[in-house]
Image (cartoon, rainbow, N blue to C red):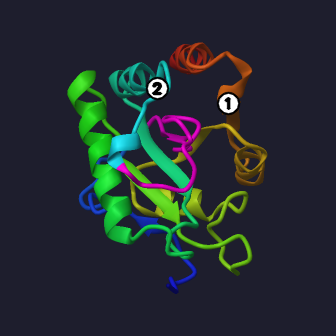
Amino acid sequence: MNFPPSPILDRDAIDLPYFQKGVVVFDRDGTLIEDAGQHNDPNKLVFLPGARETINLLNSLDYGVAVASNQSGLESEKFSLSDLNTFNEELKRQIASDCPAIIHLMVFCPHLVISECSCRKPKPGLFHAIEASGLGRVILFVGNSESDELAAKFFNIEYIDVNTNEFPGRIMEWAKSNELR
């Protein structure tokens, strides 16, 4: 399936609030939820420890929360856009029912690695799309891979790696230190 060379925003990207403090962006697979390969099966949805509580904390401190994820399974037809939307709706439903925590926006690059797009991480197109949505300025990216770290570097924002065993404590420290500024 061919997609335009731009990111896909989730269906809820209408009338978004604006967050003066900024937006914290999370990678999805391997950061918020277990990375179970290229799938979008709601039955395989498992949150990583601390993910929900971290989003709830950021919400309570008036930060916007977004997800930016490469989902090349769309272009390779391993799953459909409908599958992706169903999965993301379930992810947002579960996260809202437990804490309650809110993910305000989800953006995805549907393209294969070989595609000529501007949105596949480590390119910063997903961050540009978040800012263009009106949600606020992207100020932090939380991820789990080299491409995530490079995307943050290219966009000139702070990066927290969940693989350092400092997650979610490092994000809580970051949020508290920003509250003091």
Residue 177, horizontal then vertical, whole percent: 59, 15
Single out the mark in the foreground, 2 or 1. Answer: 2
What is the tally of numbered marks visible in this picture? 2
Question: Callout 1, which amino acid?
Answer: Ile
The local secondary structure at tag 1 comes to: strand
Which residue sits furthest left? 97
Residue lying at 40% horizontally and 19% vertically, measured from the top left: 53
Residue 5, horizontal then vertical, whole percent: 58, 81
Viewer-nearest residue: 78 or 102: 78
Q: Mark number for residue 106?
A: none
Q: Badge 1 local density, few (<14 within 10 Å), some, or many (20+)?
A: many
Q: Which residue is mark 2?
A: 51
Q: Taking 140 as reference, is 49 left or right?
A: left
Q: Taking 112 as reference, is 62 left or right?
A: left
Q: Mark number for residue 160?
A: 1
What stretch of residues is rendered in magenta? 19-41
